[in-house]
Amino acid sequence: MNTCVVGLQWGDEGKGKVVDILAEHSDIVVRYNGGSNAGHTVVVGDSRFALHLLPSGAVRPNVDCVIASAVVVDPEVLLAELETLREKKITLTDRLFISENAHLVLDYHKKEDQLREESLGKNKLGTTARGIGPCYADKASRNYAVRMGDFRNLAQLATKLQAIVEYKNKVFAAVWNAEPISADDIFQKCKFYADRLLPFTTDTTEFLHKSIAHGRSILFEGAQGSLLDLDHGTFPYVTSSNSSSLGMPAGCGVPAKFVDKYIGVAKAYTTRVGAGPFPTEQDNEIGQYIRDKGHEYGTTTGRPRRCGWFDAVAASYSTKIGGIDSVALMHLDTLAGLKEVKICRAYKINGQERTFFPANTARLSQAKPVYETVPGWDEDITNLRDFHDLPRPAQEFVHRIQEQLATPITIIGVGPARRQTIFR
């Protein structure tokens, strides 16, 4: 069976844990979008792994890992991740495959990202400043793009970098009055990267199609969340790639028909990082309780996340556009201790109640949540493994979300560890 795992909210849903669990029964795990702005956390025993570019299946010793064509690769971050895993006796020497068509995030992308974000003042998008957006912009403009395959011809790459950096420096000086960067410094880094990453570089589209022909099981892993999708999310407060399951076919060259099951991941509440409308946000003691109890601070940035009640309107939209077959509901344990918990079942916009999510930011900014309330529970549920052992209010909460999404909830997270999972 081939499976695709995707976030249903604004990212940070717990996809890393779900992918890690499912990877036990997969031959290959494929990361198909985004860059090092992703932060997927995997907990194995006493070890915690924070992965930004490597697929979350990397910690499984017998799983092949693919970084597909639509991922933008920061070589420095990738090499640091490989070294971190190596220190923990996990090697990917013969099982990491990086697309030769994946674009590279280089120093000038990060500088451009930082300068642009700082210049926006109070209108900042909330980018991680990792250079992801500028790299995707260069990819779209084509003339100033560098890809993994360019490492194969360093002389040609040196010439290309001279032209790119000359152009970038003109922009930096004219727009932001910024200091120039050195093309030679970047090239020297690229020589170092090429020496270490070229052995992993290949045609991943061919590799995946041959794997499908041989009946190997593939797990496709999305980064960020569906509401951050460049085309279908809350633009402009989105990421720079197609982060819903719609991005999977384009991201790795595998038609959607080869995926047998789409699993959407959502938290039992909602979080968001950076700017943008957030109808169910609780900028109060409830939001702080969720933030502290759920450790809602960014894996990539360390920034505190905005927290609020579960938004069934938003999550239902993501299940529809993503063709989601089942849902993994994570962080249910975080809500323990609240007297009541709420689910947003609809929005009121201009006095009219609606249940279909408006991805248009102007309309979403006018949305007022319509809640239904379920009693809370005090019991610690982190050691429970059977759904029927959950407190009755917790069961009711799950049932109500399942009804709102019209999609079965088959996995429930009650803690960060692999074992802290309930399967239905």
Image (cartoon, rainbow, N blue to C red):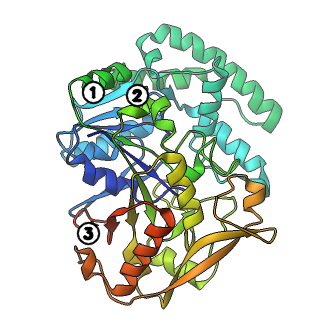
**Labelled disc at residue 212:** 1
Specify the quadrant of the image occupied by residue 304: bottom right
Q: Secondary structure at mark 3?
A: loop
Q: Secondary structure at mark 1?
A: helix
Q: Residues within 10 Å of mark 2 (few under 14, many from 20)?
A: some
Quick one: 105 or 363, which is closer to the camera?
363
Q: Secondary structure at mark 2?
A: loop
Q: Pointers 1 and 2 in contact (CB under 8 A)?
A: yes
Which amino acid, by three-letter code, is at mark 2?
Answer: Val
Please name the residue shown 60% across and 32% down the image: 136
Which amino acid, by three-letter code, is at mark 3?
Answer: Gln
Q: Earlier in the sequence, mark 3 or mark 2?
A: 2
- Image spot of residue 38 (x, y percent): 48, 48
Specify the quadrant of the image occupied by residue 331: bottom left
Task: Quote the CA–CA distance across marks 3 and 1.
Answer: 32 Å
Q: Earlier in the sequence, mark 3 or mark 1?
A: 1
Query: In the rendered view, would you say 218 is above or below 424?
Result: above
- Image spot of residue 399 (x, y percent): 41, 74
Dot 2 corresponds to which residue? 254
Quick one: 389 or 110, which is closer to the camera?
389
- Left or right position of 207 against 242: left
Q: Earlier in the sequence, mark 1 or mark 2?
A: 1
Task: Quote the CA–CA distance across marks 1 and 2.
Answer: 9 Å
Q: Pointers 3 and 1 in contact (CB under 8 A)?
A: no
- Image spot of residue 272 (x, y percent): 58, 62
